[in-house]
Amino acid sequence: MRIRRQGLGSLAVRLTVLVLGVALAALPWRGAEAQIGSARYSAIVVEARTGTILIDAGADEPRFPASLTKMMTIYMLFEALRDGRTQLNSRVVMSEEAASRPPSKLGIPPGRGLTVEQAILALVTKSANDVAAAVGEHLGGSEERFAQMMTMRARSLGMTQTRFRNASGLPDWEQVTTARDMATLGRRLFTDFPNRYHYFGTVHFAWGRAQIRNHNRMLGDYDGADGIKTGFINASGFNIVTSAQRDGVRLVGATFGGSSWVERDRHMGALLDQGFARMGVAPRAPSSVMAAAAPAPRRNTPAARPVAQNNQRLAQPAQAQRRPQQQVASAPNRQGQVAVPVRQTQTAAARTPPRPAARPAQRVEQGSAVSGAQRQQTANAAPRPAQR
């Protein structure tokens, strides 16, 4: 009887281990929650002059914009400059509320401030959340009112599926957008403010004795890239909107859901390469740095499909000599081919997007240039945003 009980106990242990193993296998792999091909992924590439869609992969799916929100904050600031409601040397004062925003931030004490031009540069390079909130108060009286103004202006630009709730992109259940809407905003920033767009190409911003490096490493790393903005929160993964020009052709691309800024940038470069090929632009070879840094393909990454054009299938672009860049970032080139399924589509009719499935996690907005350890430290320290 004793032997039988021991045998039954051993069998029970084995069954328990088996059940736990099956349960663990059924859980989602957290490393794949924000990567190319995941549920958070979407992308689009458009020709900037006409808005013609060249690549579309879930471009109308609701996503959290993260610091891509600051593109709209800057758009509103450019409009105020154009209309004479503020000046480049006007003073933006930091309130206690704005100064309380978590990093990334300049850390300006309440009561002190910076000029409008310094605010633009801080938003473009460091993606400063305290500065974004202060700009919202400067233009709207309060950040909440400014977010309402941002949403109304976005709708007038054709961004029908975007809602803003703050000026920075800090997590909020109701702050959503799409890849299509962000590409639209990227186009309009270039076409509506050609004399201001150069700010997005700023590589370094001098703040006191510090030289702040732009989080956008596509500048200099991708031949022809001259803007626009990066973003990251836990709920969205790594996002980017990029504008690049080659041989007189300008493209604007947006992609969401990268698992790292390296993956995101390399994938954005691959999408732009396909877009330029569709426009008949001669291909450029990746730099030796980028080729040496090419990571192994991800196990969850779908196979590449050439994009059809005029009933013909496009081959991968041939390599050619890359032109030197005037502004070369220190990070490796991320122009490599990262495969995703893409499709050609027509502009979707306006519709109200459903709430994204992913819940905003603890806020980590360090931009794409910070280390994983810094992001984890910030996530552990920052409180969870309240649901609205």
Image (tube, rainbow, N blue to C red):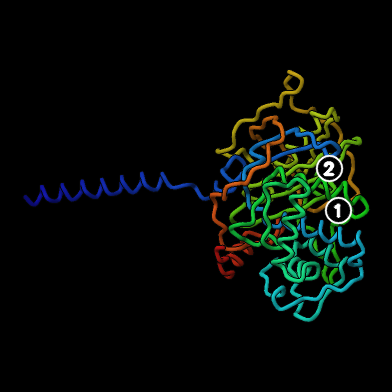
Residue under label 1:
201
Examine the image and state in which quarter residue 375 appears.
Answer: bottom right
**Looking at the picture, how far across and down is residue 339, in whole percent?**
65, 34
Count residues near mark 2 (Cα–Cα under 10 Å), then give few for <14, some for 14-19, many for 20+: many
Count residues near mark 1 (Cα–Cα under 10 Å), then give few for <14, some for 14-19, many for 20+: many
Indicate whether 69 appears above or below 14: below
**Looking at the picture, how far across and down is residue 15, in whole percent?**
26, 45
User: Left or right: where does residue 231 sit relative to residue 90?
Assistant: left
Residue under label 2:
244
Query: 203 or 199: nearer the eye?
Result: 199
Indicate whether 53 appears above or below 166: above
Instruction: Answer yes or no: is residue 300 visible.
Output: yes
Kindly state the secondary structure of the residue where label 2 is placed. strand
**Amino acid residing under circle 2:** Ala
Q: Earlier in the sequence, mark 2 or mark 1?
A: 1
| Residue lying at the far top of the rendered structure | 311
The quarter of the rendered structure image containing the C terminus is bottom right
